[in-house]
Amino acid sequence: MIVRWQRLQAYTLNLEQVFFLKSPANNALVKPKWAVYEVAQNAGRCNKLGMSYKTPLNNKSRKQSKRATSHEESFCKVQFIRVSPKFNLSPALDTMAFLAFVLLLSAQFKLIVPMEKVQLYRFPSGSVYFGNFMRNPFRYLWEEKLASSMVADRSHCALFCVNKPKCYSFNMAAYPDFKGLYRCELLATDKYRSTERFHANSSYHHYCPWVRIADRNELNASCVVITDGLLEAIFPQSPCESAACMNGAVCVPEYESNSYYCDCKPGFCGTHCEQGGDKTCSQIKLCNLPDGSYFIDPDGEGGVKPFKVYCDMTDKDGVGVTVVSHDSEHRTLVDGFNSRGSYSRNVKYDESDFVQLASLTSSSANCEQFIKYDCYHSVFLKNGKMFGWWVSRGGEKMTYWGGVDFVDYKCACGLTNSCADPIDGCNCDSNDDVWREDSGLLTDKSKLPVTQLRFGDTGIANDGSDEKGYHTLGKLKCYGLNHDLQ
């Protein structure tokens, strides 16, 4: 015996539920002889919503149902039940056979509750399948087809899908061919997983399961109005229809449990991917992700192109530090450049340009970069005569060194009067035959990162000694969130 059960309800108007048993002895589909019933329920609930639901039934619908209502009546729910027994019974016996069969199923297989709660289910035994499908008028999902066939109507196409283990949705021709048949195309995905491939099409309708999270009697759910020819109604939106997933996540329906989950983009977490972010490593850290390389997008969609950085999740008390490497991190010799600033080293940052790095520093609460110069008989910032300097991302010639902000011609020792010569602003300004160094952190994020290093006074001294130096530039590090931009 093959039984097909279809139900359409007002708030799931475009849903078609198909339920059938596949007899091991006979897998062929039987041409249905429908017994049709129309049931109106909870009309009073519609008035609470302040809305009316008119059913302009056509002549065919009136002939099908003995209980068909006039087009002036209003409904909150309209239910159609179709029964297709293999045996040629009278309408009265059809009804009795159906009710007896439902009782049998509820007792033997406990299917009634699962059928109410799920949208697409295939029993492991392979004997029972059922599903709900929502019609998306004149839409087409451009995905590889599992199978294709010519069918008599959408019920047969739905049967074709639920009987195919990997089928999750189907495209069906909007109009029949000269034989009165419709092309039915089965798909192994759905419009939620393949949103970018779901397009308008004048020749097809698309059918996919619909995730119903809200209870059927809840009237406070977000709603949309749709029209399906026979009935104009209002029904709760599926979470995947109402953008339940945030921050570019993909809503993945789980039809067997009538639920869904959000497939978050890297750096996001939470039930709806509402936590974390990909602006900086400090946002990525919110999801307790480990150290590693990540793509960040500091200024969000529509701005600069996302770029790859390293996230150190343990530095700075575990706040999540964005680390950008470059090609000038090694200790590099400066020798044979006597004129001021005659030595030049351009700094190239990995995987990013200066516009992208500017967006990073703007989105971060703090940024820093270590800088150091080791000198031997090489003057640095002596008496305001700059032999060495660094260049900001804006192309400015910066007049202070690491460990100092906004104080011209000073190194860190100059702020504490601890330089080799107390009258100098830097250790290297001693200009003697002792290896000395000036170093510290640059922390003005509006100037970072360093784009160029310039040095001089590394020729031959008056006493014939060889003047030289070594420069070292650390990675750019940014951490914390600039909440003014959130």
Image (cartoon, rainbow, N blue to C red):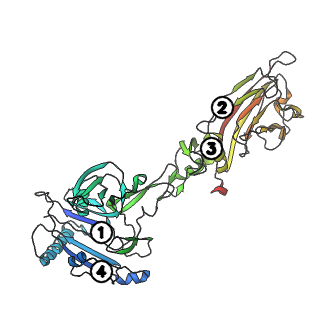
Question: How far apart are the alpha carbons under marks 1 and 2?
Answer: 64 Å
Residue that numbered label 1 is attached to: 116
> Who comes first in sequence, dot 1 or dot 2?
1
- Residue drawn at 30 percent across, 77 percent down: 78
Residue at (63, 46) in percent of width and height: 360
The x and y percentages for residue 270 are 49, 57
Image marks 1 and 3: residues in contact by CB distance under 8 Å: no
Horizontal and vertical percent position of residue 205: 33, 60
| Local crowd size for mark 4, using a 10 Å CA cut-off: few (<14), some (14–19), many (≥20) | some
| Quarter occupied by the N terminus | bottom left
* Amino acid at dot 4: Ala
- Secondary structure, mark 4, is strand
Residue 318 higher or lower than 42, as above or below: above
Marks 1 and 2 close (CB-CB < 8 Å): no
Which secondary structure lies at badge 3?
helix
Would residue 193 be seen by someone viewing this image from the given angle?
Answer: no
Q: In 3D space, how far apart are the residues under numbered discs 2 and 3 (Cα atoms)?
A: 20 Å
Category of crowding for the residue at label 2, using alpha-carbon neighbours closer than 10 angstroms: few (below 14), some (14–19), many (at least 20): some
User: For the residue marked with disc 2, what is the amino acid?
Assistant: Glu
Distance between the alpha carbons at the discs numbered 3 and 4? 61 Å
Q: Check disc 1 and report its element: helix, strand or loop.
A: helix
Tell which of 6 and 71 is nearer to you. Answer: 71
Q: Identify residue for label 3.
A: 356
Q: Which mark is residue 40?
A: 4
The residue under label 2 is 329
Q: Can you say whether 25 is above or below 63 in the image?
A: above
Q: Secondary structure at mark 2?
A: loop
Q: Confirm or deny contact between disc 2 and disc 3 (CB under 8 A).
A: no
**Tag 1: residue type?**
Glu
